[in-house]
Image: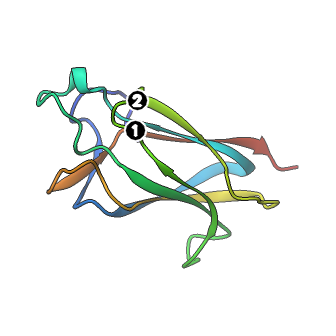
Amino acid sequence: VQPDMYPGNCWAFKGSQGYLVVRLSMKIYPTAFTLEHIPKTLSPTGNITSAPRNFAVYGLDDEYQEEGKLLGEYVYDQEGEPLQMFPVTEKNEDAFQIVELRIFSNWGHAEYTCLYRFRVHGKPAE
């Protein structure tokens, strides 16, 4: 979401629940998603409680669609690598140009949640 990975240079939203809708440059058949946060070692506080924890990804037909097609539900592991990849887990035959990342919780930060990078991987639709 930001061009670099410096601590604090993230897209933060208030609380532990929020969402991000991304329009891709073309329609794709999604295969996986990558979520990235800074490692604990780079955090000034020594923890990454503002990292997303439970989240889901949806494919949307247009930006006005209320409920998209669930592509998977995941947990970002705060003890894991900073960059974590999550395969599409829900069977899906559709191609999407719009993808929604929905965050349900973070690792305990009371005030905000920080998103550093979110990537969508897939095969271009013909």
Q: How many marks?
A: 2
| Quadrant in the rendering for residue 97 | bottom right
* In the foreground, 45 or 67: 45
Q: Residue furthest top?
A: 41
Q: Position of residue 36 (x, y in %)?
A: 42, 35
Q: Position of residue 38 (x, y in %)?
A: 31, 29
Say whether marks 2 and 1 touch (CB < 8 Å): yes
The residue under the point 61% across, 71% down is: 68
* In the foreground, 85 or 98: 85
Q: Which residue is identified by label 2?
A: 80
Q: Position of residue 107 (x, y in %)?
A: 27, 47
**Res 100 seen here:** no
Disc 2 crowd, CA 10 A, few/some/many (<14, 14-19, 20+)? few
Relative to residue 10, is residue 72 drawn left or right? right
Kind of residue indicated by mark 1:
Asp
Q: Secondary structure at mark 2?
A: loop
Relative to residue 18, is residue 57 drawn left or right? right
Disc 1 crowd, CA 10 A, few/some/many (<14, 14-19, 20+)? some
The residue under the point 14% across, 56% down is: 111
Above or below for 32 versus 13: above
Q: Which residue is identified by label 1?
A: 77
* In the foreground, 106 or 79: 79
Above or below for 103 versus 78: below
**Res 46 seen here:** yes
Display coloring? rainbow
For the residues labelled 2 and 1, the Cα–Cα distance comes to 5 Å
Q: Secondary structure at mark 1?
A: loop
Kind of residue indicated by mark 2:
Gly
Relative to residue 28, is residue 18 drawn left or right? left
Relative to residue 106, is residue 3 drawn left or right? right
